């Protein structure tokens, strides 16, 4: 069965907008039952092309524990296919920790809602071979002995968080548990030979699982949606250009931050600090100029893409008109074929009548030459009928 490739942001977003699918995927990742899920507002979004390399959704999930109790946790899900996005991940986490929306409503002490960070990566993390890596925090005393009494504690939970790292390239058909089965829809070894936008999967592997079949059907719908395919084409068009730009900007930001830290430490060297600040200002102006030029280029590219879309629509209209003409022509040919068949039948009937007439005249004793003359036919036709 051919389905849309969920590595694309537009397809992944389409999946996670479905509450049932979101609960299925998050339950598998957390290894706990998620009974309710809600998409929460956040500071960063990937609606604009500037953040195409990182896709981010924040969830408020109600989780049921084994003892039957339920509680709310925050899930920050980030998806990227670029290895140089670690700094951006940290920036997003910083926003989550500082957001007042993530404080429990009934908390007088400002206790934060527990958070789990989920990273879906399109690249491998060093030599770690496990497709899914769980990084959980634990508490220890001075002698490295685990502290269990009083844990979990709201204060501790507010300052630390667990992480789940998914390495898509490490999946490769490995299905050993529920999570492997759910994540198998991301397995890039199933990419279609024609296009990386489509995966060719064996739907029978999920026939006994209603939740997985629901995911498969939604991916099939995404593959059939022309606007979805167009958005995937746009991602393919912009991806390489924007990723290079994002990486360059991120590295420059990191370098500027390091320089700023160094300047603060060198309080005794005021003249050198002033010189460095001027150099940084020049770099920032150059960077702003470059960004403006890139923005202009992206706008021009967007205009070209819109023009191409218009041309494609016009071409589609022409093809439809041509298809109509061909159908009309096919109808005419069918009518002509019917007429030819009727004419052929008439000719056969006439030939039969002629043969009958010749035989009757021959039996009457008329000579072939006379018969040919009377019937206005060639003498050979008479002789053939003898």
Image (spheres, rainbow, N blue to C red):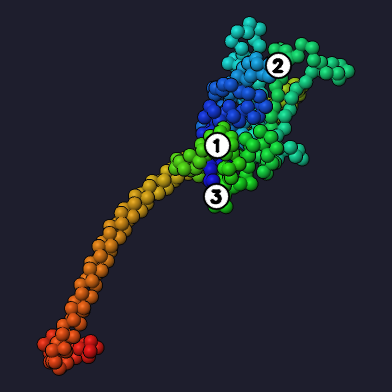
Residue at the location (28% across, 62% down)?
334
Image position, residue 129 (x, y; %): 75, 39
Q: CA distance from mark 2 to mark 3?
A: 45 Å
Kindly check if marks 1 and 3 are in contact, taking CB atoms under 8 A apart as contact. no
Q: Nearer the viewer, mark 2 or mark 1?
A: 1
Identify the image quadrant of residue 22: top right
Residue at the location (28% across, 64% down)?
333
Q: CA distance from mark 2 to mark 1?
A: 36 Å
Q: Nearer the viewer, mark 1 or mark 3?
A: 1
Pointer 3 residue: 195
Pointer 2 residue: 157
Identify the image quadrant of residue 247: top right
The numbered mark, 2 or 1, whose residue comes first in the sequence reads: 2
Image position, residue 320 (x, y; %): 34, 51
Give the secondary structure at mark 3: loop
Nearest the eye: 218 or 89: 218
Residue 272 seen: no
Pointer 1 residue: 213
Give the secondary structure at mark 2: helix
Nearest the eye: 298 or 151: 151
Residue at the location (40% across, 49% down)?
312
The numbered mark, 2 or 3, whose residue comes first in the sequence reads: 2
Nearest the eye: 185 or 227: 185
Quadrant position of the C terminus in the picture: bottom left
């Amino acid at each position: 069965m051919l389905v849309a490739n969920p590595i694309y942001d537009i397809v992944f977003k389409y999946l996670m907008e479905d509450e049932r699918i979101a609960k299925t995927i998050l339950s598998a990742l957390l290894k706990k039952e998620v009974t309710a899920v809600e998409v929460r507002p956040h500071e960063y979004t990937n609606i604009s092309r500037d953040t195409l390399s990182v896709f981010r959704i924040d969830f408020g999930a109600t989780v049921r524990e084994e003892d039957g109790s339920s509680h709310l946790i925050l899930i920050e899900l980030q998806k990227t296919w670029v290895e140089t996005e670690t700094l951006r991940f940290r920036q997003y986490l910083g926003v989550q920790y500082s957001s007042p929306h993530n404080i429990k409503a009934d908390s007088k002490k400002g206790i934060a809602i527990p958070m789990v960070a989920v990273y879906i990566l399109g690249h491998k993390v060093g030599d770690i071979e496990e497709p899914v890596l769980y990084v959980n925090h634990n508490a220890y005393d001075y002698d490295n002995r685990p502290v269990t009494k009083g844990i979990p504690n709201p204060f501790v939970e507010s300052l630390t968080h667990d992480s789940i790292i998914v390495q898509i390239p490490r999946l490769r058909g490995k299905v050993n548990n529920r999570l492997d089965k759910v994540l198998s829809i991301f397995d890039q070894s199933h990419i279609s030979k024609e296009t990386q936008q489509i995966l060719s999967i064996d739907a029978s592997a999920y026939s006994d699982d209603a939740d997985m079949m629901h995911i498969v059907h939604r991916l099939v719908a995404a593959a059939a949606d022309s606007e979805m395919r167009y958005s995937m084409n746009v991602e393919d068009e912009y991806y390489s250009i924007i990723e290079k730009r994002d990486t360059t900007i991120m590295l420059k930001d990191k370098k500027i931050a390091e320089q700023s830290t160094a300047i603060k430490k060198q309080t005794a060297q005021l003249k050198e600090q002033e010189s460095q600040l001027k150099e940084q200002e020049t770099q920032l102006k150059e960077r702003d100029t470059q960004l403006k030029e890139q923005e202009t280029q992206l706008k021009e590219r967007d205009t070209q893409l819109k023009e191409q879309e218009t041309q494609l629509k016009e071409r589609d209209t022409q093809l439809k008109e041509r298809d109509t003409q061909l159908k009309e022509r096919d109808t005419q040919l069918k009518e002509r074929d019917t007429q030819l068949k009727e004419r052929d039948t008439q000719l056969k009937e006439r030939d039969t009548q002629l043969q009958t007439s010749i035989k009757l005249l021959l039996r009457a004793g008329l000579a072939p030459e006379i018969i040919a003359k009377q019937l206005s036919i060639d003498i050979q036709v008479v002789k053939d009928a003898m």
